[in-house]
Image (cartoon, grey):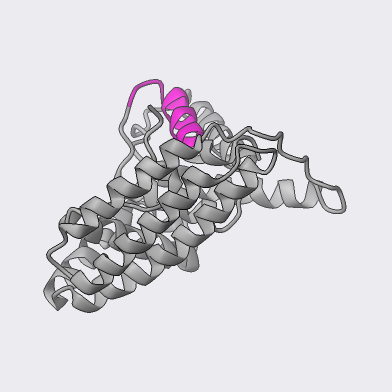
Amino acid sequence: MRNYFNYFTEIEERFQKRRGSILLLSTLDWALIEMWQEAGIPLEAVLAGIDAAFDKYESRQKRGRMRRVNGLAWCSQAVMEAAEELREASAGTAGPTAAAGDTGFEHERVAMHLEAAATALDASTIAQDACAATAGRLRELAANARTASASTTAAHEMETFERVLTVLEEKLFAALTAAAPEELLVALKEHAGRELAPYRSRMGAVQLRQVEHQFVQKQLLVHYNLPRLSLFYMSQQ
């Protein structure tokens, strides 16, 4: 996979380029990308799937009018097919070794991202004990990031931070879900169902459930104005 932390950005840019216009990705689209990332689907496979889906769309479009592609989920089936083809093609071969220092994520920027997330969690009005504990842990990680050596293991260090942040997010989501009102969770699931409805024929049952789960989690954070912890959401500036 190319730059580990460019996964989201490169997918967004490829989708916008093939669509031919700037379309901000929806919460559903971001949830789908995150599901692909967590499932270990290589960036190469996602980009190939997007290209394949649009190539097919464009060939059909020449034979008659078709609706505009308005969501990344429209490419989901092609992405899964591309991932399987890549897996079969690479069976028994060793993957390329990432170049040292290729992440582009300096330790100071990581620390600032974690501290900003901690500050936002301090202001939480829900699951305050869990948010306070998470904020404390983020500040510890920020201090660790600042003292980490800028060595040839920089990429490994960032991936280690990401694994810890994934665990912290899962624990935080569990606390938020337990504390959130039942009617809010039901409303979010209904919202997810409406957003997914146009794509149900292009996604398997397991994939649908996973995307719905990601969607509800993201919307729960938005509702309570809480941050994402993952370095994928760190500012590129």
- Tell me where residue 95 appears, x and y as whole percent: 78, 45
Q: Quadrant of the C terminus?
A: top left
Residue 16 lies in the magenta-colored region:
yes
Compared with 63, 123 (above or below) is below
Total numbered labels: 0
Compared with 12, 223 (above or below) is below
Q: Quadrant of the N terminus?
A: top right
Name the residue rendered at 41%, 42% in the picture. 72
> Quarter of the image holding residue 16?
top left
- Tell me where residue 153 appears, x and y as whole percent: 67, 44
Residue 186 lies in the magenta-colored region:
no
What predominant SS class does the magenta segment belong to?
A: helix
- Tell me where residue 8 appears, x and y as whole percent: 46, 40
Q: Quick one: which residue is furthest to the front in this view?
A: 147
Foreground: 135 or 199? 135
Foreground: 223 or 30? 223
- Tell me where residue 192 appears, x and y as whole percent: 27, 60
Compared with 1, 81 (above or below) is below
Residue 194 appears in the rendering: no
> Quarter of the image holding residue 56?
top right
Q: Which residues are magenta?
A: 9-22
Foreground: 181 or 27? 181
Name the residue rendered at 46%, 68% in the picture. 205
Residue 128 appears in the rendering: yes
Name the residue rendered at 78%, 40% in the picture. 96
Residue 235 horizontal side relative to residue 45, left or right = left
Name the residue rendered at 24%, 78% in the picture. 178
Q: Quick one: which residue is furthest to the right in this view?
A: 92
